[in-house]
Amino acid sequence: MAPDKSKDTVVSTSSTNDARSTAFEYAPAPESRSIVDIKPSYGLFINGEFVDGGGKAFKTISPSTEEVLAEVAEADEADIDKAVKAARKAYDKVWSKMPGRERAKYLYRIARIIQERGRELAVLESIDNGKPIKESRDVDIPTVAAHFFYYAGWADKLEYSGFGNGNPQPLGVAGQVIPWNFPLLMLAWKIAPALACGNTVVLKPAETTPLTALLFAEICQQADLPPGVVNIVTGAGETGRALVGHPDVDKVAFTGSTDVGRAIARAVSGTDKKVTLELGGKAANIVFDDAPVDQAVEGIVNGIFFNQGHVCCAGSRLLVQESVAEDVLDRLKRRMSTLRLGDPLDKNTDVGAINSGEQLKRIRELSELGDAEGAERWEAACDLPTKGFWFPPTLFTGVTQAHRIAREEIFGPVLSVLTFRTPAEALEKANNTPYGLSAGVWTEKGSLILHMANHLRAGVVWANTFNKFDPTSPFGGYKESGYGREGGRHGLEAYLK
Amino acid sequence: MPTGQASGAAGTAADFSDITRSNESLRRFLHGLPGVDQVGAEARAASLGTRSIKTTAKEFAIDLAIRMVDLTTLEGQDTPGKVRALAAKAMRPDPADPTCPPTAAVCVYPDMVATAKEVLGDSGVNVAAVATAFPSGRAALDIKLADTQDAVEAGADEIDMVIDRGAFLAGRYKHVFDEIVAVREACGNAHLKVIFETGELQTYDNVRRASWLAMMAGGHFIKTSTGKVQPAATLPVTLVMLEAVRDFREQTGQMVGVKPAGGIRTSKDAIKYLVMVNEVAGADWLDPDWFRFGASTLLNDLLMQRTKMKTGRYSGPDYFTLD
């Protein structure tokens, strides 16, 4: 029997098709800013103290409002020298001599303070970076704490790490330069393993997002970390160059763009500095016709719109099997229409602000290139705030390997959609990129997952999920996505000899 | 993807006869539905659960949730007195506040329908009856149909039937389908809710298949649980069912309602469900015609929260009636 026609006319308590329910409008639910105390100006954190910088101070703004948050010192070459000297002294006199189990106590203490001050860190991160509070609160900060806990556990067990022939030694002073997309998380990825292994660090946060690193400096003070073990120097490209080029730095760790990564590789060539680089990506997120389609759509959304697409391992190329492409795209567009873009501090915001005017310009330029090269643009209908830097969740269909939006990293909420017919074609297209940081595979067929994972040239392959991070899992790229691994046991290698 | 031919226009029946012709064709169709990834579905449900619903949105949600409650008593110890009290509560949940809306229905065993109907009259609050050898469904079809007819004759506006889980798990989909069709016929003008007992079906793939089976058989509502088996309603199970009704409308133009039942006790939980309805199925389902809560203790928590929103103060449980 087919469904009855009278269905809509039987007993009911209200009208049916013209649903009378007014829309369920979520009232604003802003997280309070009062928990953070942003100072009008910040110095450099060298040898356990905040000091003035020799360079020209710069302003950090909130990308969602363009409001100036604070003035931040710029470290010049002399400041870098001071910081490296402080790190060297702390390395020689204190940190490298301290037993691992004692170093671990400091790391555990830092991890606990991060948890205790988690809300403060999350709010500050969202203000300075523009990312939604639900991400800084539920992803960034908990993962930061987890990273410190994890590496704290390694500090007294390094002889079992498999590195350094059973007697691994620290390298010395690490110069670390990190990006603006996950400011505190990238700091944790760099500092936690370095300290666990007995190195001291000079870290430069990105110029648009220095505030959580400076709050982390306060946490180091609160934890009574010996002076000089962690030094935070703020500034832009010049400061980074000075740090990477300093002759007394033993180890350079960088996360950021492939261009800057190349420059760093050139700068350290011919020296005996050890280097790890975590660079760009143009990850393929591959959806087969037997994929769990609703979860795949979630994974696509999470892959490219998480953190406004400011993710080096973002699934920015959707490869969808042609036989289901239409259905997947319909579902994807419907889902994208429910994304809530706006105030990063509102707990119901899914998509926050683009981190800077400069980045917004780049996203716009590359998207216009997509239009010009004949791809079809679709964007979720949403009102963009008038102040600040915003870009709507966008996808391009009709994209081929020949389009620049299929090849260049956009680093924004822009998805390029390509189709394929067979697993072999999917692999060929996925691997046909100078990058190789991550990839995603969506299928209910276990053997296909294993086949794809074996043949995808990417550092991380996610199966039926995307953008999952864990301190126990190594992360890093193939080809122009960089070298070296961060996280897990593998992450220790970069800081041991 | 489903291959049933859509008729397009709302209100006209979709023709699934090719699919429902035989057990084989049904099986092919149901097993051809896209799979549900357990981890992903649970993560999505959890993430919707983090929405922060405050002030005006919360007021809206609480009143809507009250209007969606099927106030339920399904006990061996039910008496006419208990049912009359419950029916009175359904019509006037908060005697201290006449602006408080009534619930959608009262849900009882068939032998209590007449008693409930007597109290509710034409108040607009429906009487729902659980039939078909509730809760196990282990009886012959003619007994199930007699049970249904009995409830309908006593004045039930809605019938909550249980599917034969044993047949479903044994792959006898046609048997389950035919039973739903027969019960639907026996319902006459009463609305039919089809209970899956998802705690016994266990996998989300099964929940999705049961959803399509029930929708194709003409169920007006699909419902998670009897309340007699744990786990009863959960957010991820409801998510999968909401996806099913959404996809069914996309394909046929017909809307089917969803009713999670059992285990929803707090306003906070209820609001999580409404957020999910809103963002997964869509705002059209935010109506007692298309979404219900099968619950008993939930109502008093909704009333307490409602009073708190209106007065700014929490009042003690003694200010709300126990029925």
Image (spheres, rainbow, N blue to C red):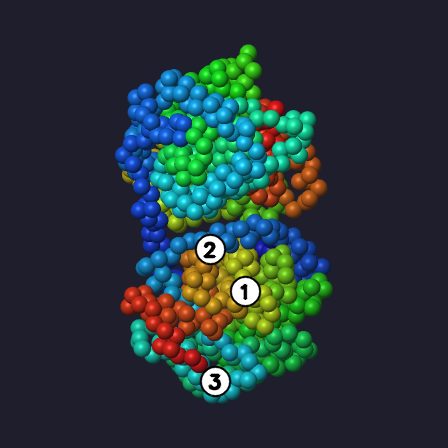
* Cβ atoms under marks 3 and 1 closer than 8 Å: no
Protein chain holding label 1: B
Q: Secondary structure at mark 2?
A: loop
Looking at the rendered structure, the kind of residue marked 1 is Ala
Q: Secondary structure at mark 1?
A: loop
* Cβ atoms under marks 2 and 1 closer than 8 Å: no
Protein chain holding label 2: B
Of A103 and B268, which appears nearest the observer? A103
Q: Residue at x 41, y 77 (%)?
A: B90
Asked whether the residues under marks 2 and 1 belong to the same chain, the reply is yes
Of B19 and A118, which appears nearest the observer? A118
In this rendering, position of residue B105 left or right of residue A435: left
Protein chain holding label 3: B
Q: Quadrant of residue A356?
A: top left
The quarter in which the C terminus of chain A is drawn is top right
Looking at the rendered structure, the kind of residue marked 2 is Gly
How far, Cα to Cα, is label 2 from label 1? 15 Å
Q: Mark number for residue B49? A: 2
Q: Residue B207 location in percent, x, y?
A: 60, 60
Q: Earlier in the sequence, mark 3 or mark 1?
A: 3
In the displayed structure, A56 sits above or below B322; it is above
Q: Residue at x 61, y 75 (%)?
A: B135
Which residue is label 1 attached to? B233
Q: Mark number for residue B82? A: 3
Q: Residue at x 71, y 41 (%)?
A: A447
Q: Quadrant of residue A25?
A: bottom left
Looking at the rendered structure, the kind of residue marked 3 is Lys
How far, Cα to Cα, is label 2 from label 3? 35 Å
Q: Is residue A374 visible?
A: no
